[in-house]
Image: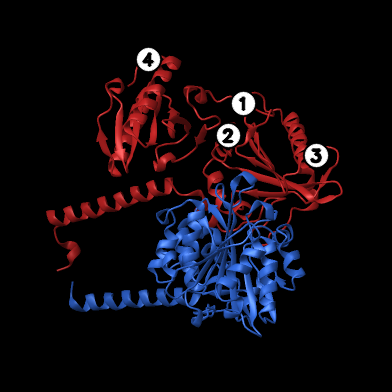
Chain colours: A red, B blue
Amino acid sequence: MNVFQRQRTCTETAIGLGILLCLAAIVVVVLLAQRNFNPAVRVATRSWSAPAPGLTVPGERQRAQPGSAQVGFTAYAPAGVVEFGPVEEFDEDTLSDKINGKADLYLTSGFRRLRCQRFALAGGEDEWFEWFVYDMGTMPQAFAVYSIQRRPEAKPVELTEFAYATRNALYFVCGQFYVEAVAATPSAKLMEAVVAMARNYVAAIKPGRMHLAELELFPAEDMVPYSQTLQIATAFGFDGFNNIFTAKYNADGKQVLAYITVLAEPQQAATLAQDYYRFLIANGGRDVASADALSGVKMVSLLDSYEVVLSHGNIVGGVHAAQSKEVAERVALKLLKHLASKTGGQPN
Amino acid sequence: MRRRDFMRRLVKATAAAAVASGAAFALHKPARMAGPTRAQARPLPDFSVESAGRRMAIVTGPDRAKTVQRAFAALGGIEKFIGRGNRVLLKVNAAFALPPALGATTHPELVAEVTRLCYQAGATAVIVTDNPINDPQSCFRLTGIARAAEAAGARVVMPTESLFKPATLLEGRLIHDWPVLIGPFDGVTKLIGIAPVKDHNRSGASMTMKNWYGLLGGARNVFHQDIHTIILELAMLVRPTLVILDGTTTMVTNGPTGGSLDDLKQTNTMIVSTDQVAADAFGATLLGKRLSDLPFIVRAAAAGLGTADFESLKPARDSVM
């Protein structure tokens, strides 16, 4: 008897449906995994296509053509500063060819393009600096890579709202651009030239006022100066935590990290806070009762540290990896009070 | 279904599968390779000196030339490792076109001093090479390595395409038909890796084992997604005579490129070791990291490539100001 002419049994139907469900589940898992695919892999595994005009070619490491100097930075160089190399350009495919292991930080923060060029003091070949301009797409994304790499001991510079200098380098945000100028030596004359070039650049770009309202949601008391950062994606290893602002606080001689993110609706904030709490528990965290003043706030003990998760209106916030429960509670309470004073309302 | 029909279908399906597999095998060409050369199963010889055993010297002091000299002396002299007529390859870290002051690359003074010591021990040739991330000419020039090496009598070999050959690490998972900078090893009898101690955004640290990454060609950035495995496999692939880990300054943040002098910490330490795992384990202490922060060290030790318990080697310690 031909098997295809036989009547289907209930068992066969059930097995067939089971297989189809398994396949559907696999598709969902693959799609979810692809959604969070690391951009560095996408870049590295992409087959090479013809480079955009003026871009360096990976592997061949070609310099930009002389004609591309017109898109360089010579126009901003002050008197006494001369070109010390051609303009180089890197896109998301080639960024690793310039900054290697740091590329991920930029690629996950909205990176579009890097242009860089070396300059030197006229007549001084050993006194040179390299000028890097990262186009990050938006000002907050430029702030993100600026803030994460900020050198804690560096001094602020009156250039833009977000600018600082070290002995041999200048770093600043200028609109959607994150700019680094790295000098070969800590020479005062070289750094004067770097700052002068930066002023010319800012005057030409005219970034306007750069304001991040989220930074004001952190209480100023006990905050470590210039410790605020923005993490664009997957903060604290949690896929749902995007656009997370952080700030460090001094507490009992130690530093504690507070964080916030602003969502569109209070319901979204409540859901995200719950999801993060579940994530912590799923990764070995243990629910801990918090102080009365923090009723409704979740506290989790995880790997000898304490996490606080709260939602307040459309804001999710908390404390990350505090070394003691008391400190975690104190900083969380301070954050909660400040949120209430800034936005009104009660915790969700 | 009749047995005859079943057998007929089975034969057809088997034939179709065999034809498809045969065609796939015939058409297979490693996509990463430029040429048709078959990968070498053992692409690099073992350069270690068996009689030297696992040794380590740790010398503190701010002057690289003095500390590396003293470290070799503590190990019984460089002659224990480099002999008359040896051709020595120095694998430096010239990854970035950055000045030596930023600590992102092997310091030129160290390259010059090791070259001088090799010749003093009777070496007939010293070759310096790396496959940098940035443009090689700019890297070797701006790091000062080319000028220092050549002034000391070494020959700098730039990574031209013809010097790469496909290589496979039989016991590995990632290094399979992958282009490796093998050309500069022609005729070489001793290998010394020289690397600075650096923080690294992906691997946690870049030291002597990560330094071999500069022997890889092709679109090697793909390995950053499994960075600890590739470092492990490189340590399996490369068996050096010695490694020199320069912790005179340590890049403690924003590695591997750094950029600011504020990323550096003066740690005044030079390590010379026949055990690259032990050298990196000690380097971790300069970075203020635990072994659990750097899985490639733990895995390399577990693979028998060396010991993460560097104290078990009873390192010779000295200081020179």
Which badge, 1 or 4, is on the more N-terminal residue? Answer: 1
Residue at horizontal 80%, vertical 42%?
Answer: A74
- Residue type at tag 1: Met
Marks 2/1: CA distance?
10 Å
Cβ atoms at labels 2 and 1 below 8 Å apart: yes
Query: Quadrant location of the C terminus of chain A?
Result: top left
* Residue A94 vs residue B95, the one in the foreground: B95
Q: Chain of mark 1?
A: A
How many numbered dots are placed on residues in this image? 4
Residue A53, how many percent across, how many down?
A: 71, 50
Q: Gap between marks 2 and 3, in whole Å?
A: 24 Å
Q: Of helix, strand and loop, which one carries label 2?
A: helix
The amino acid on which the numbered mark 3 sits, given as a three-letter code, is: Ala
Residue marked by disc 2: A143
Q: Which mark is residue A345?
A: 4
Residue to which mark 1 is pinned: A210
Which badge, 3 or 4, is on the more N-terminal residue?
A: 3
| Rendering coords of residue B150 (x, y %) | 75, 69
Residue sitting nearer the eye, B26 or A318: A318
Residue B78 place in picture, x, y as percent: 60, 76
What is the distance, in whole Å, between disc 3 and disc 1 at their CAs? 24 Å
> Which residue corresponds to mark 3?
A77
**Which residue lies at the image location 65% right of the left edge and 45% below the top edge?**
A114
Task: Specify whether residue B33 is in view.
Answer: no
Helix, strand or loop status at disc 4: loop
User: Looking at the picture, which amino acid does disc 4 mark?
Assistant: Gly
